[in-house]
């Protein structure tokens, strides 16, 4: 007679049933394409976070990771409790401000800034962490990342800002651009953060 503890557990529903999976060990379902690397995993999450963006020009997502744990996330949009650009329009567009200039004239906060601020708001130390972003940070975000103790920035999409690149290099923050990675969420122009 077989004991109850020896019986294989039944799986009531497949795990990741919508991810194109195949039967694996002990009845569990595993993705056919294999597990993503940690870097790909975190970059994919930044793309999901970017979908919350309320910027009319570019959806950007960011997350702060330390020891393979997500400490904070952020997307670009208006400060908490204020009307979003989706609702009131884009101040920068109305004033004809070109991309990459006059960052202070904007209702929104950048994704990287939001992630750093969320960590601060909840008392989470990000010293020595990595910042994953859908796009290269601008000079303002680079300065914040340096002072917050970020040691590595991994991103997919370009946002050419020579000053940001120079300061990160001087501060010995590793800047890694991931090639052949899907861009930020669709539906927004790629000209402005």
Image (cartoon, rainbow, N blue to C red):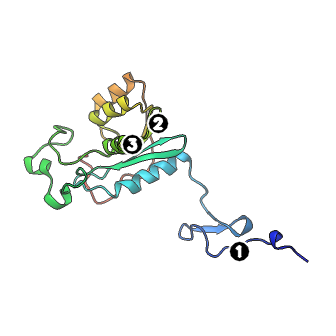
Q: CA distance from mark 1 to mark 2?
A: 40 Å
Q: Earlier in the sequence, mark 2 or mark 3?
A: 3
- Residue 137 lies in what quarter of the image? top left
**Element marked by disc 3:** helix
Q: CA distance from mark 3 to mark 1?
A: 40 Å
Mark 2 crowdedness (10 Å alpha carbons): few <14, some 14-19, many ≥20:
many
**The N terminus appears in which quarter of the rendering?**
bottom right
Camera-nearest label, 3 or 1: 3
- Measured from the top left, where is residue 102 in percent x and y? 16, 37
- Measured from the top left, where is residue 6 in percent x and y? 83, 69
Nearer-the-camera pick, 67 or 185:
67
- Measured from the top left, where is residue 174 in percent x and y? 44, 30
Q: Where does label 1 land, which residue?
A: 10
Vertical placement of 148 versus 88: above or below? Answer: above
Q: Earlier in the sequence, mark 3 or mark 1?
A: 1
**Element marked by disc 2:** loop
Residue occupying image coordinates x 47% and y 42%: 65
User: In the figure, is residue 40 to the left or right of 98?
Assistant: right
- Of all residues, the one furthest to the front in this rendering is 123
> Of the numbered discs in the image, which one, if any, rests on residue 119?
3
Q: CA distance from mark 2 to mark 3?
A: 11 Å
- Of all residues, the one furthest to the left in this rendering is 95
User: In the figure, is residue 79 to the left or right of 172?
Assistant: left
Mark 1 crowdedness (10 Å alpha carbons): few <14, some 14-19, many ≥20:
few
Q: Earlier in the sequence, mark 1 or mark 2?
A: 1
> Of the numbered discs in the image, which one, if any, rests on residue 129?
2
- Measured from the top left, where is residue 30 in percent x and y? 63, 63
């Amino acid at each position: 007679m077989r004991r109850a503890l020896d019986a294989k557990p039944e799986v009531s529903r497949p795990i990741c049933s919508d991810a194109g999976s195949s039967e694996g060990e002990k009845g569990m379902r595993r993705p056919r394409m294999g597990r993503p690397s940690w870097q790909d995993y975190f970059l994919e999450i930044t793309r999901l976070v970017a979908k919350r963006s309320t910027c009319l020009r570019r959806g950007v997502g960011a997350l702060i990771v330390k020891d393979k744990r997500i400490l904070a996330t952020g997307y670009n949009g208006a400060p908490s409790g204020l009307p979003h650009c989706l609702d009131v329009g884009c101040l920068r567009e109305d004033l004809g401000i070109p991309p990459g200039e006059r960052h202070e004239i904007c209702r929104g906060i950048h994704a990287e800034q939001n992630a750093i601020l969320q960590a601060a708001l909840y008392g989470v130390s990000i010293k020595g962490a990595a910042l994953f972003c859908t796009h290269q940070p601008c000079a303002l975000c680079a300065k914040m990342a340096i002072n917050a103790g970020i040691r590595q920035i991994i991103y997919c999409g370009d946002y050419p800002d020579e000053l940001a690149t120079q300061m990160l290099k001087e501060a010995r923050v590793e800047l890694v651009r991931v090639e052949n990675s899907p861009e930020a969420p669709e539906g927004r122009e790629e000209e402005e953060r």
